[in-house]
Amino acid sequence: MTSRPSGWRPAFGQSGAAAGHLINQRVGLGDLFIFFGWFRRTLEENGRLTFDPQDVHGRHIVFGWLEVGDVIESLPLPKGLRSLRDHPHVRFFENEVRPNRIYVSSLSGLKAGTFQTEREGIVLTRNGGKRSRWLLADAFESLFLERDLSYHGNEARWDREGDKIVLQSVSRGQEFVLDGERHPKISDYFVGRIKAASTALPCRYSPDIH
């Protein structure tokens, strides 16, 4: 791992339509990003990793978080954030589609980090289905009732399975936004898992959040 400059903090950049959506949803200081991605299981054969043929679709899994402490909207960088000069959304600021925003981790509180294992993380995909078919905990019931997760207002996308919430997520999307104050159980759900992961490994800053 390359050494980090003094004062370095994790930062997440977005531009164009994705950044516009965050702005329209009033995402800013104190808000919490929850990062998920598409993962497939692997097997080790003769010292090499290969994809598990039984895991055809893969799964969406939460792998990290970032609590927003600063938002960069223009250059030059503030004095305390000059360590971000090599961040791609800063280095190529003028080449990015506008608007261009960089969300910087908070200095205290939840900060930013990654979940180290699948168990620590949150598997979103319903077992045995396509990765876009999610099975969520009962903490998400209020979201099922109000359907105010951005891009997911269509009632047909939501269902129940026992005490779980089923969601057919949109086929492609980057920024799904919900109001944590309107859905406190969901906020508590994620915060609890973040705090548990942070206790297990005190240093939660990750080099993989760009």
Image (tube, grey):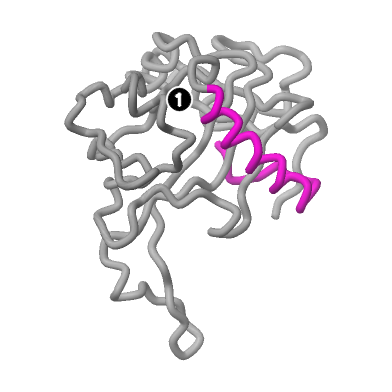
Which quadrant does the N terminus fall into? Answer: bottom right
Q: Residue furthest bottom?
A: 46
Residue at x-position 29% and y-position 38%:
167
Q: Is residue 49 above or below residue 16?
A: below
- Going by the numbered disc 1, the residue's amino acid type is Gln
Q: Is residue 89 above or below residue 170?
A: above
Q: Horizontal and vertical percent for residue 36?
A: 46, 43
| Left-right relation of 159 to 195 | left
Magenta stretch prevailing secondary structure: helix
Give the crowd class for mark 1: few <14, some 14-19, many >=20 residues within 10 Å: many
| Left-right relation of 132 to 26 | left
Q: Horizontal and vertical percent for residue 159?
A: 25, 37
Q: Which residues are magenta?
A: 184-210
Nearest the eye: 108 or 79: 108
Residue at x-position 43% and y-position 33%:
140
Q: Is residue 194 magenta?
A: yes
- Provide the secondary structure element on which disc 1 rests: strand
Q: Residue furthest left?
A: 156
Q: Horizontal and vertical percent for residue 206?
A: 66, 44
Q: Which residue is the site of mark 1?
A: 14
Nearest the eye: 18 or 111: 111
Query: Within the image, what quadrant is residue 76 found in?
Result: top right
| Left-right relation of 188 to 162 | right
Q: Is residue 150 magenta?
A: no
Query: Within the image, what quadrant is residue 166 found in?
Result: top left
Nearest the eye: 28 or 127: 127
